[in-house]
Image: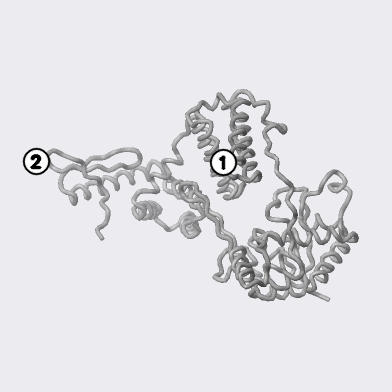
Amino acid sequence: MSRKKELTEMPMPKGVAKRWRKKYQGHIYYFRGDYETAAKTWHAKRTELETTEAEDQPNWYRARFQRMLEWCQAQGMVEDVEAVTKALEGTDLDLSKLWWSYDDREKGIWSERLRQMERPAKEPTTIGQAVEAFLAAQYVRVAANAISAGYYDLLRRSLNHFADTIGRRVGVASITGLTLSTYHSAVLGKVSKDGWSPDYASGYIRSMKTFVTWAWETELIENKPRNLEGGRLTIETKAKKIKVFTNDEIKVLLGAATERNKLYIMLMLNTGMTQKDLSDLRPDEVDWTKGRIKRKRSKTRKFENVPVVEYPLWSATFALLKKFGSRKGERVLSNADGGTLITETLTEDGKYSKTDNARCLFGKLVRRLVKDKKLKTFKPLKVFRKTSPSRLEDKPEFAACARYFGGWSPRGVSERHYIAVPQATFDRAVMWLAKSYGLEK
């Protein structure tokens, strides 16, 4: 396979010598003659430009690598993050040669990416432009771990729907309460005619409110719409019946599960973890001698009023954790190949991608058991999250432990400031759960 040419051939009249062009750092350079001669001339010119840049801006290449690192982190490009970090930390490396080796390998894509990142932003005037500006700001927050890639994906889908519904070329400054009411009606139509669930539709309305609030705070719209707050733009959702696993179902699942899958199930029952919690569990959160886990939920780690809960581990849970858990590194649990249980990434164009090894492993198990008629219905892995708290609520002696077990925020002033579950009582509640499931005597 022939290598792609660095220079672009220009269409010339018949009989006129060939001419080539090269775009570099926003400038276009032209060269005459055959390709080999033009390429040599370009290489000499680039060396001259590099020398000038290096002399005028000593940290020019280091700054480029820093921006490149930001991009790689945002995209979840682990290997590139490690390589670029190593380049920035090195003292003997020729950063100029290293930069061009990256840029040439990717056919100049890095130069173009950085030009886009460094290009001064124009103030958006239309709804479409404002949505793009808002999403760009949220994209940066994903890279900084301020929001999840999944939440960004919801914002991207819902706000593009908002822009398409209202009109991308409509002036953003013209957004009023009527605009919001019109969009609310359009989403309600999706619920009644197109089969959207009320929960799904509510996510779109919440995203719209977040965007409009941002537009007002950044002064893209002069007045905050009066119906932005309050209940007029809500979509009613019915309270769902809480699903839980029964003792018989748990017995069947644990009996058919691999040891690794069994560990995930046991931890969810024992500590109320979700798949994200399993993936984020750190070695320093586990007491490897006493068999206890002390942590905040991953989802609410940044909130001060969410409790740090200490869970005693059941003997079977602790035995499996010691067998499969790592006591070093960033994470206790990994998949069979040593990778992260959950990965969330954004592609270059902002598309969302997610892998969930725990859910995938559990899903295969349940589908097989349902097919073999050993289980009646399919229940997803997240049902374990509600199973133990629901069982505690049904036990008067331990009802006060239910919310604490789930790591949920306290409700009201009394729970927040005055009511604390004693650790001894909580320990008894957690150990009682094991007995109620028939897992310990």
Q: Quadrant of residue 207?
A: top right
User: Extreme right residue here?
Assistant: 397
- Which secondary structure lies at badge 1? helix
Residue in view at x 30 percent, y 42 percent = 23
Q: Quadrant of residue 233?
A: top right
- Seen from the viewer's position, the closer of residues 127 and 5 is 127
Instruction: Give the amino acid type for the residue marked by disc 2 in the picture.
Output: Gly
Number of residues whose C-alpha sits closer than 10 Å to that of mark 1, classed few (under 14), some (14–19) or many (20 or more) = many
Mark with earlier residue (1, 2): 2
Residue in view at x 29 percent, y 45 percent = 48
Number of labelled discs?
2
- Seen from the viewer's position, the closer of residues 376 and 239 is 376
- Seen from the viewer's position, the closer of residues 33 and 436 is 436
Q: Are marks 1 and 2 in contact (CB under 8 Å)?
A: no
- Which secondary structure lies at badge 2? loop
**Residue 2 in the image, given as x and y percentages of width and height:** 24, 58
- Disc 1 versus disc 2: distance between alpha carbons? 56 Å
Residue at which label 2 appears:
15
Mark toward the viewer: 1 or 2: 1
Residue in view at x 77 percent, y 74 percent = 315
User: Extreme left residue here?
Assistant: 15
The image quadrant where one finds the C terminus is bottom right
Residue in view at x 40 percent, y 48 percent = 110
233 over 325 or under it: above or below? above
Side (left or right) of 16 relative to 420: left
123 over 137 or under it: above or below? above
Residue at which label 1 appears:
158
**Residue 214 in the image, given as x and y percentages of width and height:** 61, 33
Instruction: Give the amino acid type for the residue marked by disc 1 in the picture.
Output: Ser
257 over 363 or under it: above or below? below
**Residue 47 in the image, given as x and y percentages of width and height:** 29, 48
